[in-house]
Amino acid sequence: MYLKKEYLYEHDQPYKVMPGPEGYVIPAAASMGVTLPDAGGGLLYGELVTEDVAMEEIARRLLTDPNPTLHPGPLVIWAWNEHAIEKARAVIGIAAEIPDLMIIPMADYRPRYPKVDPEEMINPNHPNLTIWHNKEGICVFVGVHCHYANLTLKMIRAGTNCCTVALCAEQGHEDAMLTVRDCDAAKLWKLAGVIKRVREKMGIPAPTAAPTGGFGPVDHKKIVVHTPEEWARIVESARTGKNFAMAKAVGVPPELGRPEGAI
Amino acid sequence: MSLDYVKVSPGFEKYIAKEYRDFVEHGPFGKKVSVSQVGTFKEALEEHPMCAGCAMTLFIRLAIIAFPNPEDTITVGTAGCGRLAISQAMIPFVYGNYGDTNAVASGLKRGLMTRFPDKYKDVVVMAGDGGLADIGFSMMMHSWFRREKFTTIMLDNEVYGNTGGQESGMTTRGAVLKMAPLGKKFDKIDMPQLAKTAGCVYVATVVPNNPRRVESVIKKAVLIAREVGPTYIQAYTSCNIEYAIPTDKVMEDANNVEKDRYQFQEYITDEAKQYLADKWGYSEYKKKEIPGEVKA
Ligand SMILES: Cc1ncc(C[n+]2csc(CCOP(=O)(O)OP(=O)(O)O)c2C)c(N)n1
Ligand code: SF4
């Protein structure tokens, strides 16, 4: 592994990508010598490992850290195409294995000022607000474009003590503490299987309640989104693929005609 | 053409924030909305961090409502107050460096035309008078000389608002500003005239206190830019902070300025008129048949 000389002189050991808070302006892990894994690999706190090792640790932490949270990004949350829907299915499969999970989407990247509502959204320009508000011990990003993952992961490492996981569709992300590369739907289902196996090995029962939203702004209780029955139906259709149809079509195709109301 | 990208993936419909659900159900994508319907649909721009009462915000809000196909529009902006609001709209926004908006928009538009040859993808530059008439002047003019097919909208508050009140080329002669205490020494640049000379096929000047007119000129400018050539809109969007206009007098000021130096002007080439008539059904531009004329 290539190591930045200054760092080695100072610390005499490789740079580790660990939960922070690391400081106000932190280095990009790549500039500290952390490299991306080859196919079949992953990163464990900055160290190259096999995908299986990374997945085991992701599973262990998701099952033991407080307030585990999934942050599906635009490439999962919006039904752009069949591929996005297939990934959404697999993410539901992962969610179904983790007790006490929160799901808080990153629906887009636009700046949100004067404020975000951290119980129902995370924004890449100030993700720490959502992490703090919901006291997230571990958070998982999936379907977030690289350039905003860069920003988000660094800000979380800089200002919070949350463990970050990047389930990346490309080469993995060196600024996440735990990452697996090439996360298509099949790889995500594999992770769901690993979480199930680790959960059973640890004697943790399968969750029955649905994942919640974040902590409500007034009563600070987790926002209930689905009844257990509703959630069971969603999980069943995600697992079988039956009735996992496209969401209701919204809007009509914009016909090429003079816009109504034009003067 | 489908609008799959405004559907939430199955299973996540209730996890996505309410405002996105509202936008999916009641937003303007794929529909034709008008400023007269404000309040009956979810707008693409709602929250922003600009000063209370800023007329620029009102104009930007109206402009975004007026986009003919907001779901296929990309805005380009730069440093300056306007981007604070434009970037928060539910429409992709590209932040050009201060000065290079029209170069960025040129490349973007050409790329979109190559990538989506069968579809209109509208590119709209919205930037301040400093960003366009001063530092961005050369790139703006050259985009017009090259007849790049996108719309440029100048948010003309006649000052560098975002940096505390320096004069711009669009400031009026004699104006004294916080950071121009001696008063401006030369006239406001006649940008509409330059736009015509440089090849814009549609040019209009507006103030924000006439929403229907703002809507009308923006729709025309965006539609014409799809196929005919560059279009330019110059909007008076006062800076109530730097010109010390009390919030409740902002519209009154716009009225006065409209009478003084911002009368409504609209320039449209014959080619653009014909395009609007033939392609988009603008009856006012349909060629009137001359009685007795013999058709070939
Ligand atoms: C290359 C460069 N020079 C200077 C600046 C500093 N700057 C930021 S905003 C601004 C003035 C903006 O004025 P204008 O374009 O008129 O927009 P307004 O804020 O008035 O809407 C300046 C000079 C910059 N961001 N980039
Ligand atoms: S400084 Fe002026 S132009 Fe900028 S937001 Fe405030 S009022 Fe508007």
Image (cartoon, helix red, strand yellow):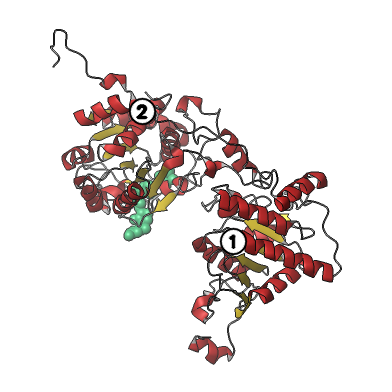
Q: Quadrant of the C terminus of chain A?
A: top left
Which label belongs to residue A82? none
Q: Position of residue A84 (x, y in %)?
A: 58, 52
Residue at (20, 42) in percent of width and height = B187
Q: Nearer the viewer, residue B266 or B291?
A: B291
Q: Is mark 1 within 8 Å of ligand 1?
A: no
Q: Position of residue A245 (x, y in %)?
A: 65, 43
Residue A130 lies left or right of residue A10; in this view the side is right
Residue at (74, 53) in percent of width and height = A215
Which label belongs to residue A184? 1
Q: Nearer the viewer, residue A5 or B225?
A: B225
Letter of the chain that mark 2 sits on in the rendering: B
Residue type, mark 2 in image:
Ser
Q: Position of residue A140 (x, y in %)?
A: 65, 63
Query: Ligand 2 is located in which of the four quadrants?
Result: top left
| Crowd rating for badge 2 (residues with CA inside 10 Å; few <14, some 14–19, many 20+) | some
In the rendered view, would you say A115 is above or below B42? below
Letter of the chain that mark 1 sits on in the rendering: A
Dot in front, 2 or 1: 1
- Which residue corresponds to mark 2? B216
Q: Nearer the viewer, residue A170 or B256?
A: A170
Residue type, mark 1 in image:
Asp
Residue B123 lies left or right of residue B3; in this view the side is left
Q: Is residue A66 visible?
A: yes
In the rendered view, would you say B96 is above or below A12? above
Q: Secondary structure at mark 2?
A: helix
Q: CA distance from mark 2 to mark 1?
A: 46 Å
Q: Are marks 2 and 1 in contact (CB under 8 Å)?
A: no
Q: Secondary structure at mark 1?
A: loop
